[in-house]
Image: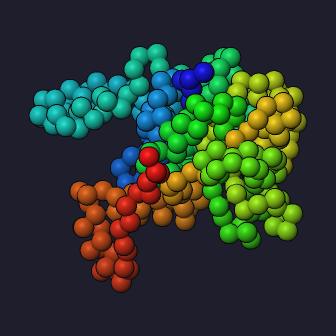
Amino acid sequence: MRVRTAVFPVAGLGTRFLPATKAMPKEMLTVVDRPVIQYAVDEAKEAGIEHFVFVTGRNKGLIEDHFDRQYELEKTLELRGKLGPLAQLQKEVPSAGHASFTRQQEPLGLGHAVWCARDMVGDRPFALLLPDMLFMGKPGVMRQMVETFEVTGGNVIAVEEVAPDQVGSYGVVARGAGPDNAFRVEGMVEKPKPDEAPSNLIISGRYILQPEIFPLLAEQRLGAGGEIQLTDSMQALMTQQPFVGVKYVGKSFDCGSKAGFLAANVAYALEREDIRNQFLDLLADRGIEASFTSIPQAAE
Ligand code: UTP
């Protein structure tokens, strides 16, 4: 079955970015000149996703506005002959009926946010993208996952390697047989002690899940951190259905942390031909020597 729908949980409070996120959603923070949520939506589009479901909360109205037409602005751009930016704006708005918004009234955790999308997703597999993780890769990470899903079915999760002493901050998988782009996941554990971790492969914010996750989420109690955790329900689903890991080709940026967000800005600015040289000069003025490395590319 094709993956047509993607869920974007955007109802978190973004406390690590206060005061920036007091009135503005953290998903609207910009990396260069695009909000982080736009990168996740672009990645989903590239993977063939047609329906975008946003789980929003209070103070998140800007996200809805961002994915809507802005007639005054469009008219002004047209009158001023700025046809390039106009076409770009229009291209990025999902077509009518293909963006849906639902509310998570209280930020009870990622698992709860995903559960809030159950009626909009229905009875089909769906993609889940945590928008504060940005991925540079060619093709995009979700596309790499969809390619695997079309062969394996089941549930697919993107993983990446971290230094063994860092595993304690993440969900970690136990790797079974199979190649890097489609191996069997034999177990997962949330925030293990480094000496108890089954590997150094962490779950990194991109998933393709079967709808059977929803009844399991409905039963979940509060887990680690007083939140309803997605990993707990995935562990339960794993007893019924296969999970496949994709060690994606690419580079990730955790834009939920300040350092990761700043690193993303540097990396994405260096990718941009229109500002790269000027930006390199500014960095050099501060004695920083940055090198431009092109986007990691997956083998055909
Ligand atoms: P995070 O835990 O990184 O987001 O969740 P947060 O809670 O907003 O951030 P901090 O720790 O307070 O700074 C990852 C994604 O899941 C969403 C967030 O909006 C973010 O995009 N999320 C998280 C929800 O939609 N609902 C929740 O209850 C929790």
* Residue 107 appearing in the image: no
* Residue 90 appearing in the image: yes
Left or right placement of residue 283 versus residue 110 in this view:
left
- Residue found 61% across the figure and 43% down from its top: 206
Along the line of sight, the residue nearer the viewer: 264 or 199: 199
| Rendered position, 286 above or below 248 | below
- Residue found 57% across the figure and 56% down from its top: 254
- Residue found 31% across the figure and 30% down from its top: 91
- Residue 286 screen position, x and y as percent: 35, 81
Residue at the bottom extreme?
287
- Residue 138 screen position, x and y as percent: 43, 49
- The picture quadrant where one finds residue 17 is bottom right
| Rendered position, 254 above or below 122 | below
- The picture quadrant where one finds residue 167 is bottom right
Along the line of sight, the residue nearer the viewer: 12 or 242: 242
| Rendered position, 189 above or below 228 | below
- Residue 131 screen position, x and y as percent: 55, 43
Left or right placement of residue 68 versus residue 260 in this view:
left
Q: How is the image coloured?
A: rainbow
Along the line of sight, the residue nearer the viewer: 36 or 22: 36
Along the line of sight, the residue nearer the viewer: 116 or 167: 167
- Residue 252 screen position, x and y as percent: 54, 56
- Residue found 30% across the figure and 33% down from its top: 89
**Quadrant in the picture for the N terminus:** top right
Left or right placement of residue 155 versus residue 61 in this view:
right
